[in-house]
Each structure stands twice: as structure tokens, then as C-alpha cells.
Image (cartoon, rainbow, N blue to C red):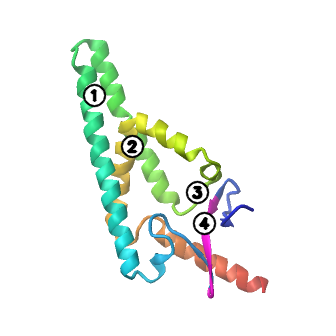
Amino acid sequence: MKRGATHADWSRYVRTVATPDGPVVLAPFVGGTWRGRGRDYRRRRRIATAAVLTVTLLAVALSSLFVVGLARPGTLPARLFASAYGLTVLAGLALGRRWVARAPTRPRWADDGLTASLGITIFLLVPVLAGFGIALLPSLIAADFPGERRARELTTMLRSTSASNR
């Protein structure tokens, strides 16, 4: 097994860190600081929220400019293409909602070095990035950060499993 604990679905995994109390599942952006919710947790949460908000605003602005530029000729094909391009924001919304629902588990392919090339591809589809950010922002403001509740549940499950194996 690479790093982390195996998730029930073999194609996904969770990142963990060993503590004296047993394994702790790391949540996205905030790592293991979700347990104490101290100063480090609040700092990481503010930085992650600001970063996602900034990238989302940039993606929304760029995709809006792209749609306006694509529709500028005023022909029907140009308007249809601009509309189709703008509607890719819906794919980003779907991806973002799915990511929030599955956090903190990760797909296995995210650990094999393809993440950078995937990031470049997603950036080329800026509206998808905008939709992903729009879907992610409400969960960044919620009481529990994305993946925190599930990290808590998985940590409890891992600790009970490791305690029964001793």
C-alpha cells in the first residue's frame, strides 16, 4: 500500500498521519488540525478560503471575457459556441459538488503524477474551474470544512480497527 489507509473502494484512499492516539485522517487544506480547531486550523482555513475565492473570481472573470469574445461576431454559430463554452461551468459545479461529498478520500490516479497535467487541462477549461470554485465556496464557509466530518468518522473507524488488531 502506498501511503494512507485504504478506503472501502479500492480505487480511492485517504491520507493519514500516525499519532500517539492512533491514525488520524487528514482533511483537505487543514490536514490534521481539524481535531483541535486551534490557531493553525483557523489560519489554514482562512488561507484556503481566500485562495479558492481568488482563483474562482479569476476563473469567472476569464470565462466571462472568453464568452463575450467568442460571441462578439454576433453570428448564430458564434453565439451557440459561446453559450456551449459558458455552460461548461455546469460540469465544474458537478465536479466540485462531487469532490466536496467525497472529501477527504482521493482517487488513486491523483497520486501518480498526473495531477499537474490534469490541472493544466482544467485551467484550459476555465468555466469548469469557475463552477468548481462556486460549488466549493459554500462548504468553505460552513461550520465543518470539506472532508472534516468524514475525516472524523474515518479516524474513529481506523482507531477502532487498529485497537481491535492489537
Kindly report the distance in space between the C-alpha atoms of the residues bearing marks 3 and 4.
8 Å
Indicate the quadrant containing the N terminus: top left, top right, bottom left or bottom right.
Answer: bottom right
Q: Position of residue 86 (x, y in %)?
A: 32, 32
Question: Magenta segment range?
Answer: 13-21
Q: Is residue 151 magenta?
A: no
Quarter-of-image position of residue 88? top left
- Marks 3 and 4, the one that precedes in the sequence: 4
Residue type at mark 4 is Arg
Q: Estimate how packed mark 4 is, as few (under 14), some (14 to 19) or many (20 or more) residues with alpha carbons within 10 Å.
A: many
Residue to which mark 2 is pinned: 129
Kindly report the distance in space between the C-alpha atoms of the residues bearing marks 4 and 1.
39 Å
Residue at left offset 44%, top offset 83%? 36
Q: Depth check: give the residue in front, 2 or 132.
A: 2
- Marks 4 and 2, the one that precedes in the sequence: 4
Q: Position of residue 133 (x, y in %)?
A: 36, 50
Residues tagged 1 and 3 counted as in contact (Cβ below 8 A): no
Residue to which mark 1 is pinned: 67
Whether residue 151 sits left or right of residue 50 in the image: it is: right
- Marks 2 and 3, the one that precedes in the sequence: 3
Residue at left offset 32%, top offset 67%? 46
Kindly report the distance in space between the C-alpha atoms of the residues bearing marks 4 and 2.
24 Å
Residue to which mark 4 is pinned: 15
Residue at left offset 29%, top offset 52%? 54
Q: Depth check: give the residue in front, 57 or 91.
A: 57
Residue at left offset 34%, top offset 65%? 47
- Marks 1 and 3, the one that precedes in the sequence: 1
- Marks 2 and 1, the one that precedes in the sequence: 1
Residue type at mark 1 is Val
Magenta span main SS? strand
Residues tagged 3 and 4 counted as in contact (Cβ below 8 A): yes
Residue to which mark 3 is pinned: 106
